[in-house]
Amino acid sequence: MFRSMTFDFAEQITASQQRLYGYIHSLVDNSAAAWDVLQETNLVLWRKQAEFQPGTKFDAWAFAVARFQVLAFLRDRQRDPMSLMTPELLETVAKEAELEADEFDQRLAALQKCREHLPEHGRNLLALYYEKGRSVKQVSEDLRMGVEAVKQALFRLRRGLHDYIEARVAHRTL
C-alpha cells in the first residue's frame, strides 16, 4: 500500500514538472533561479507527501508549495536593491500563472489530438524537426524535399496546429 502511494505521488510530481517550472519561472526573474526554486519545491513536496490529500488537485497543492518557496527565495534575495518583487505583487502574478498553467494542459491535449489527425507525412516532418532536433537541411535530405519546401511545410503545419489549438481552447473542446 505504501509503495503504491509513493509511486502514485512520484508520478504526480513527475507529471507536474513542466507546469511547476513554468509557474515558478513566471514568478522569478531568470531560468537559473527558477530551476533552483523548482528543486527546493520538489524537496518540500517529498517531505510533505503525507500532507497531500488524495482526491484533491495535486497541481493546486504543488503550486501553493511553490509559491511559498518563491516567497522564501525572494525574502532571501531582498537584500538585493534591484529586487522589485513584493509579496503582494507575487500573489497577483501567482494567480495569473496558475490560470496559465491550467491552460497549458488544455493546449497540450489539443496539440496531441490535432497531431493524431495529421497525415503521416506531416507527423513525420514534425517528429524529425521537433522531436529529433534535426535541422531544416537535414529534414530536407531525410524526406528528399527541397529546403524551401520543408520551411513552407513546417510553416503551414505550425499555423494549422496553432489555429486548431486556439479553436479548441476557445471552445473548451478537446
Image: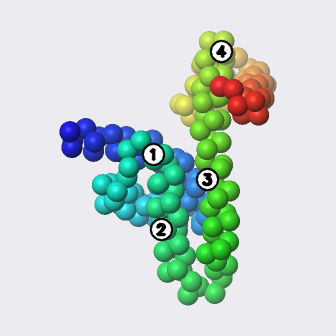
Disc 2 from disc 4: Cα separation: 41 Å
Rendered residue at 66%/49% (across/down):
100
Q: First in sequence: mark 2 or mark 4?
A: 2
Identify the amino acid type marked 4. His
Q: Secondary structure at mark 4?
A: helix
The circle drawn on residue 98 is 3
> Mark 1 packing: few (<14 Cα in 10 Å), some, or many (20+)?
few
Q: Quadrant of residue 141?
A: top right
Q: First in sequence: mark 2 or mark 1?
A: 1
Q: First in sequence: mark 1 or mark 3?
A: 1
Identify the amino acid type marked 3. Glu
Report which residue position mark 4 lands on.
117
Report which residue position mark 2 lands on.
69
Disc 2 from disc 1: Cα separation: 21 Å
Report which residue position mark 1 lands on.
56
Q: Position of residue 121 (x, y in %)?
A: 65, 13
- Pointers 2 and 3 in contact (CB under 8 A)? no
Identify the amino acid type marked 2. Gln
Disc 2 from disc 3: Cα separation: 15 Å
Q: In this orientation, does residue 14 appear? A: no
